[in-house]
Image: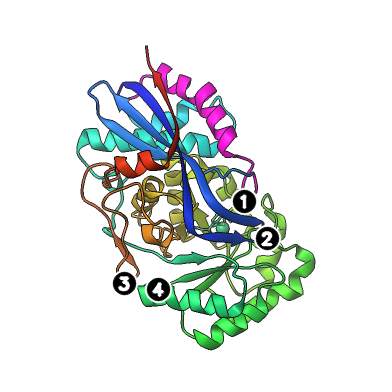
Amino acid sequence: MFIKQVILHRLVMRLKNPFSTSFGTFQDKDFFVVEVVDQHGIQGFGESVAFPTPWYTEETVETSAHVMESFLIPLIFQTPLTHPDQVSECFQPVRRNNMAKAAIEGAVWDLFAKKDGVSLAKAIGGTKQKIDVGVSIGIQSSITELLHTIDHHVQEGYKRVKLKIKPSWDTQMLTEVRKHFPKLPLMVDANSAYTLKEIDHLKQLDMFDLQMIEQPLAHDDFIDHARLQSQLVTPICLDESIHTFSNAKTAIALGSCQIINIKLGRVGGITEAKKIHDYCASHSIPVWCGGMLEAGVGRAHSLALASLPQFIFPGDTSASNRYWEKDIIQPEVTMKNGMVQLPEEAGIGYPIDWQALEKYRIDKKVWNNT
Ligand code: OSB
Ligand code: MG
C-alpha cells in the first residue's frame, strides 16, 4: 500500500435535533472526512469525531486538524505500509490525539479492505452480518417531550434506549419512563455528572432495572468507579475513562466496570479497538460500540467494528435518519427491527454521496506524497 495522496474534506452538518448531555449541547457537527488514495487510485475514507469544544475529551476539530496536518500525514507518507495495523504503530511518536489518529487509520483500513475486495467487517475479523443498535436520547426540555421521543424511537423499531442523565434529571425522570415503558431495555449515561459523595443517590438507580450506568464519575477515574461498582447491583460501563488498551486493563483489574463502551475515535482506531475487544473477550467483559453523532462514514466504520463477537450489547450506532436530513453516503444506514444489516461491498460498503458531501463542505486540502 503506497499512500499517494491525502485529502481532508471539512464538513459542517446540522443535526435534525440538538443533542444535550450533562456537559453541553451539540447542534452543528463540524468534522473531517479523510480521503486516502493509493498508487492505483483506490480511495479509502475515514471520519474525525472530535467536537468543536473539548467537553468530551481534550481534542477539538482544530487540534485534530493541526495534528493530522503537521504530524500524522507526514508519518503516513514516510512509512511503507503492508498492513493497516502498522498505522497505529507509525503514529506511536505522537502522544494521544486519538481522534486525529483514528480518522486517518480508518481511511487506511477502508482502502486496505477495498484493495483486497472484502468488507471492512470481514477484514477485521468480524463474525456478524446484522448489528443490534439502540438509540441515545439527549436530555430533553420536559418529561412529556422525553416520553414522546422514546415512543417515537420504539415505534421505529429501536429495541434499546439510552437516556442521558445528570443530578437534576435522573430518578424522577426514570420513574416516569418506567411507568410508561416497564419492559423496555434501558440504560443511562451520566458523562461524569456525579461524584462519589452522591453514592446514596446513585444507589437509587438500582431500582430501575437498567442494563448499565455509563460513566457516572470523573472522566479519568478508576478507583472511585471501583468503589461505586462494589456498592451497586447495576453494572457500570466506562466510556470517557478508556482511551487505551492499558486503560481497559486497569479498569478490569480494579473492578471499575463490568462493561466497556468502545469508540474508535476515543481509542485511536481499529487496531487498538480490536486489542481492547480481544482482552475484554478473554476476561468475559462485554463491550458495545458507542457513537459520536457521526455522519455516514464514521457510522459505517463503527458498524463494521461491532461485527466482532464480543460486541454483546446493542450500540449507539443508530440509522442515518436519526441524525440527518441527508447523510453523506448513498444508500444511507437504515435500521429494521433494531438491527442494521451490514453491507457486503468492499471496505466500509457505503459509497460516498459526493453531491451531499460537497453541499456540506466548507474546506478541502490536498497533500501529495512526493
Ligand atoms: O457519551 O456516548 C456519549 C454523543 C456525544 C458525546 C458523547 C456521547 C454521545 C452519545 C450519542 O451518547 C451517541 C450517538 O448517537 O452517536
Ligand atoms: Mg457515553
Measured Cα–Cα span from mark 4 to mark 2? 28 Å
Q: Quadrant of the N terminus?
A: top left
The dominant secondary structure in magenta is helix
Residue position marked by numbered label 4 in the rendering: 159
Question: What kind of colouring is applied to the model shown?
Answer: rainbow
Ligand 2: does it lie within 8 Å of the C-beta at label 2? no
Query: In this picture, which residue range is highlighted in magenta?
Result: 54-82
Q: Nearer the viewer, mark 3 or mark 2?
A: 3
Residue 195, horizontal then vertical, whole percent? 75, 62
In the orientation shown, which residue stands out farthest toward the top? 370
**Residue 257 picture quarter:** bottom right
Q: Earlier in the sequence, mark 4 or mark 1?
A: 4
Q: Quadrant of ligand 2?
A: bottom right
Residue position marked by numbered label 3 in the rendering: 337
Residue position marked by numbered label 1 in the rendering: 241
What kind of residue is marked 3?
A: Asn
Q: Under tag 4, what secondary structure?
A: loop
